[in-house]
């Protein structure tokens, strides 16, 4: 799979808009993140490490921060949102502040490694 832009071009316009908005919010927190791959998925890459991937699944969208610890850190913001060790699944866009907090948590981890 290619870049985020390549991936967005394959989606229905409404789905692409939700995913693009999520990436836009992530770039506010990490403006120097670049498009790349993380575990074979289009992702934002920060300092050579995958920061965040957002993908469309059959029945939901998934956010993959490549870090269970980042999800645990923002767990109080995920009340009522389906999430597990490595993913956050949603059918409606997440609040911008939740995305910002997730990206900040992951960015801080990358900076500390």
Image (cartoon, rainbow, N blue to C red):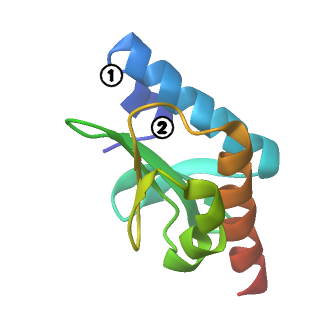
Q: Dividing the image into 4 quarters, which one contains the N terminus? A: top left
Kindly tell me whether residue 47 is visible in this rendering: no
Res. 29 mark: none
Which one is earlier in the sequence, the residue at label 2 or at label 1?
2
Q: Is residue 63 above or below residue 51?
A: above
Task: Specify the quadrant of the image occupied by residue 106.
Answer: bottom right
Residue 5 in the image: above or below residue 29: above
Res. 4 mark: 2
Image quarter hosting the C terminus: bottom right
Q: Is residue 1 left or right of residue 15?
A: left
Q: From the image, tell me which residue sits under label 1.
A: 11
Mark 2 → mark 1, Cα distance in angstroms: 11 Å
Q: Position of residue 43 (x, y in %)?
A: 50, 51
Q: Nearer the viewer, mark 2 or mark 1?
A: 1
On screen, 63 above or below 71?
above
- Residue sitting at x 49%, y 32%: 19
**Relative to the observer, which residue lies in front, 38 or 109?**
109
């Amino acid at each position: 799979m290619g870049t985020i832009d390549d991936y967005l071009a394959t989606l229905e316009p409404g789905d692409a808009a939700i995913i693009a908005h999520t990436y836009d919010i992530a770039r506010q927190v990490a403006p120097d993140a670049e498009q790349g791959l993380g575990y074979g998925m289009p992702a934002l890459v920060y300092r050579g490490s995958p920061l965040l991937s957002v993908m469309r699944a059959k029945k939901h969208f998934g956010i993959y921060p490549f870090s269970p610890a980042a999800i645990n850190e923002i767990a109080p913001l995920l009340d009522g949102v389906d999430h597990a060790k490595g993913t956050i699944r949603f059918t409606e866009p997440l609040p911008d502040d939740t995305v910002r907090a997730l990206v900040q948590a992951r960015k801080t981890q990358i900076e500390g490694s």
